[in-house]
Image: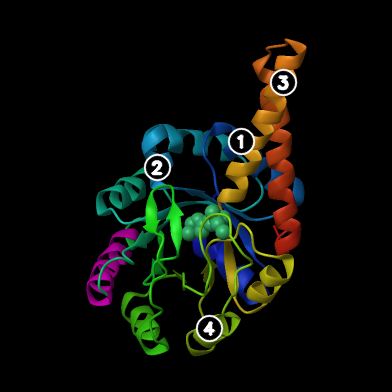
């Protein structure tokens, strides 16, 4: 069934497994990640960037979501990823998204806190949940973000933000970055433990693409219950298309459904292996 974000991340947080939060880009990738969740008996968080919401339209995107999740037996939830724009937050909440990441990380913390309180109140009116962020995650994700690493806030400021806003999930900067890593990331595992020890709530791990299996395991064991993956899906999707089209050109065969089948299989495989790696497989 379609469930609230907290239903999925609370169980994962309590049992210390991670749930893939995968940014889909179209109907094919949405259907494929849902199929992987069913195949692996895994909960799943489906994310849409603001760019995807704009390119497909929230009405069409939400219609795809309801059609494709009708009767689904594993717990799934629809989340709006990094969104600095209040109008897009309101539009998606009204449409039926289960949760949003209000990304006011470019604002001064005080203003971020003030507006996050408003977003949480708005979301609660729909029974929806909110992820909060006060330090911008390095790297640009579908046009949102910046390339310079933001200063990390003190634990005191993080706790004040959590206590004041009552966000359901928190996304800290721990040396993680969006996109492919130029060199292996150096991650601050202890920061996750410090936050969780002082204020136990599920942590969202951003910038998942490019982290090692060991880094995932370490972070998930410390409380990262939501593991964001975007770049890896984009790469799988584009490379699979490229490989198929190159061979189609060589064979002179132009049959779209066989392209879709091949790409879908690769996306299902990629999503399924993340569920196995993060430990969400078999938890539905
Ligand atoms: P990657 O693109 O590095 O996988 O990061 C995903 C993410 O954090 C989406 O919010
Ligand atoms: Zn992110
Ligand atoms: Na990354």
Indicate which label's residue lies in the foreground, 2 or 1. 1
**Colouring used for the render:** rainbow
Report how far apart the C-alphas of labels 4 and 3 lie in the structure.
47 Å
Tell me which corner region of the image, top left, top right, bottom left or bottom right, holds residue 261: top right
Q: Nearer the viewer, residue 79 or 209?
A: 209
Q: Is 194 inside the magenta-drawn segment?
A: no
What's the magenta bit mostly, secondary-structure-wise? helix
Q: Which mark is residue 51?
A: 2
Q: Which residue is mark 3?
A: 258
Q: Residue furthest top?
A: 252
Pointer 4 local density, CA inside 10 Å: few below 14, some 14–19, many at least 20: some
Does 231 sit above or below residue 135?
above
The x, y position of residue 93, in whole percent, is: 35, 50
The segment highlighted magenta reads 109-123
Pick whichever of labels 4 and 1 is earlier in the sequence: 4
284 with respect to 109 (left or right): right
Reading the image, the residue beneath label 4 is: 191
| Eye-nearest disc, 3 or 1 | 1
Q: Earlier in the sequence, mark 4 or mark 3?
A: 4
Distance of label 2 from label 1 (alpha carbons): 17 Å
**Kind of element beneath mark 1:** helix
Q: Which residue is mark 1?
A: 238
User: Circle 2 sits in a helix, a strand or a loop, which is it?
Assistant: helix
Distance (Cα) linking label 4 and label 2: 31 Å
Q: Is residue 97 left or right of residue 89?
A: right
Question: Which residue appears at 55% of the width and 64% of the height?
Answer: 7
SS type, badge 4: helix
Magenta-drawn stretch contains 118: yes
Q: Is residue 249 above or below residue 32?
A: above
Q: Dividing the image into 4 quarters, which one contains the C terminus?
A: bottom right
Residue 79 seen by the camera: yes
């Amino acid at each position: 069934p379609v469930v609230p974000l907290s239903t999925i991340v609370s169980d994962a947080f309590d049992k210390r497994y991670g749930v893939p939060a995968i940014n889909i880009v179209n109907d094919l990738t949405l259907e494929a990640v849902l199929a992987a969740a069913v195949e692996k008996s895994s909960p799943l968080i489906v994310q849409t960037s603001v760019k995807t919401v704009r390119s497909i339209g929230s009405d069409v995107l939400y219609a795809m979501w309801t059609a494709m999740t009708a009767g689904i037996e594993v717990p799934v939830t629809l989340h709006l990823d990094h969104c600095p724009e209040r109008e897009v937050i309101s539009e998606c909440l009204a449409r039926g998204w289960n949760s949003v990441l209000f990304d006011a990380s470019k604002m001064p913390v005080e203003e971020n806190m003030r507006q996050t309180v408003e977003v949480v109140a708005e979301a609660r009116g729909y029974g929806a949940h909110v992820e909060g962020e006060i330090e911008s995650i390095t790297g640009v994700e579908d046009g949102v973000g910046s390339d310079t690493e933001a200063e990390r806030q003190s634990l005191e400021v993080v706790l004040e933000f959590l206590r004041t806003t009552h966000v359901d999930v928190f996304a800290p900067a721990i040396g993680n970055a969006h996109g492919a890593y130029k060199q292996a990331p150096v991650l601050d595992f202890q920061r996750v433990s410090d936050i969780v020890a002082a204020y136990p709530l599920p942590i969202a791990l951003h910038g998942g693409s490019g982290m090692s299996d060991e880094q995932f395991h370490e972070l998930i064991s410390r409380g990262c219950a939501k593991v964001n993956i975007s770049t890896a899906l984009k790469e799988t999707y584009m490379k699979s298309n490229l490989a198929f089209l190159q061979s189609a050109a060589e064979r002179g065969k132009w049959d779209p459904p066989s392209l879709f089948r091949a790409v879908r299989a690769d996306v299902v495989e990629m999503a399924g292996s993340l569920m196995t790696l993060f430990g969400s497989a078999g938890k539905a």
